[in-house]
Amino acid sequence: MHKKVLLENIDKIHTTEMGIGRIQKNLEISEEPVGYCISKLKQENARVTKEGKNYYVEVDDLRITINSSSFTIITAHKK
């Protein structure tokens, strides 16, 4: 259900200028982080939960935090 909401609003998913650097550093990636996180969300094995005001996308060894009202990717971490 939560994954469906995120997929239906995929065009609204974004991050802040500070978020870009934080996500790239935490995930050790050099590519554009919003596209990277969206590709992870689209994976069949991605599991989405909601706690409070945030969605948590858990896929592979990652946990991506997305604000549920603004669809802002707040942070992402390797587990």
Image (cartoon, grey):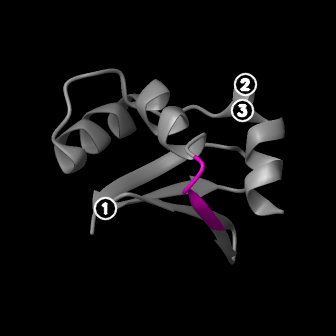
Instruction: Point out the tag, 1 or 2, that comes first from the N-terminus.
Output: 2
**Judging from the image, what secondary structure is the residue with disc 2 in?**
helix
- Closer-to-camera residue (51/38): 38
Residue 38 part of the magenta-drawn span: no
Q: Which residues are magenta?
A: 44-48
Which mark's residue is nearer the viewer, 1 or 3? Answer: 1
Residue 45 part of the magenta-drawn span: yes
Identity of the amino acid at label 1?
A: Asp
Residue carrying label 1: 61
The vertical placement of 7 against 78, above or below, is above
Identity of the amino acid at label 2?
A: Asp
Left or right, 28 with respect to 22, comes to left
Q: Give yes or no for contact between labels 2 and 3 (Cβ–Cβ under 8 Å).
A: yes
Dividing the picture into quadrants, the one containing residue 12 is: top right
* Rendered location of residue 24, percent (x, y): 24, 36
Residue carrying label 3: 10
In the drawing, what numbered circle is on residue 44? none
